[in-house]
Image (cartoon, rainbow, N blue to C red):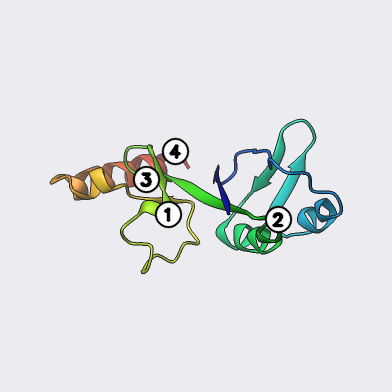
């Protein structure tokens, strides 16, 4: 089995010949294709449906999501909370931010910044 990391909302190329599967993939709600850029997966449910098709080819896509506080990317497969995570989010909190003693203050300031911007 080959694993390929992707980021929600960012284009990526599938490193296999798709043939007839291309049509099935672009029909999945939440998966878009942009010529010259590649596929874009919008959410976890779309990724789950996409993996059901790609697993036949021996390929599994694994998501990386942004830490809400510091902006680094978190590998979902290496997260210690995978068994309790809802996995339908496009952001989470990385392990280094979780271990920070000022976590609540940083989270609050990030939330206020996003609230003011929107």
The mark found on residue 103 in the picture is: none
Rounded to the nearest angstrom, the CA distance separating label 2 from label 1 is 20 Å
**In this rendering, the label closer to the viewer, 4 or 3:** 3
Chain-order first, disc 2 or disc 1: 2
Q: At numbered mark 4, what does the secondary structure look like: helix, strand or loop?
A: helix
Residue that badge 1 annotates: 77
Q: At numbered mark 1, what does the secondary structure look like: helix, strand or loop?
A: helix
The mark found on residue 57 in the picture is: 2
**In this rendering, the label closer to the viewer, 3 or 1:** 1
Q: At numbered mark 3, what does the secondary structure look like: helix, strand or loop?
A: loop
**In this rendering, the label closer to the viewer, 4 or 1:** 1
Quadrant in the picture for residue 106:
top left
Residue that badge 3 annotates: 68
Is residue 75 visible in the rendered structure shown here? yes
- x, y (%) of residue 84? 36, 69
Rounded to the nearest angstrom, the CA distance separating label 4 from label 1 is 31 Å
Q: Nearer the viewer, residue 65 or 80?
A: 80
Contact, mark 3 vs mark 2 (Cβ under 8 Å): no
Q: Residues within 10 Å of mark 3 (few under 14, many from 20)?
A: some
Rounded to the nearest angstrom, the CA distance separating label 3 from label 1 is 18 Å
In the rendered view, does 66 fall on the left or right side of 50? left
Rounded to the nearest angstrom, the CA distance separating label 4 from label 2 is 43 Å
Q: Residue furthest left?
A: 101
């Amino acid at each position: 089995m080959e694993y390929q990391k992707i980021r929600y909302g960012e284009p990526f190329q599938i490193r296999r010949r798709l043939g007839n599967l291309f049509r099935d993939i672009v029909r999945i709600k939440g998966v878009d294709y942009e010529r010259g850029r590649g596929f874009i997966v919008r959410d976890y449910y779309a990724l789950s449906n996409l993996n059901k098709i790609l697993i036949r080819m021996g390929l599994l896509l694994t998501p990386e999501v942004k830490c809400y506080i510091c902006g680094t990317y978190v590998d979902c497969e290496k997260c210690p909370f995978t068994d309790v995570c809802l996995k339908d989010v496009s952001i989470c909190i990385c392990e280094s931010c979780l271990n920070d003693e000022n976590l609540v203050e940083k989270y609050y300031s990030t939330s206020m910044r996003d609230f003011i911007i929107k």
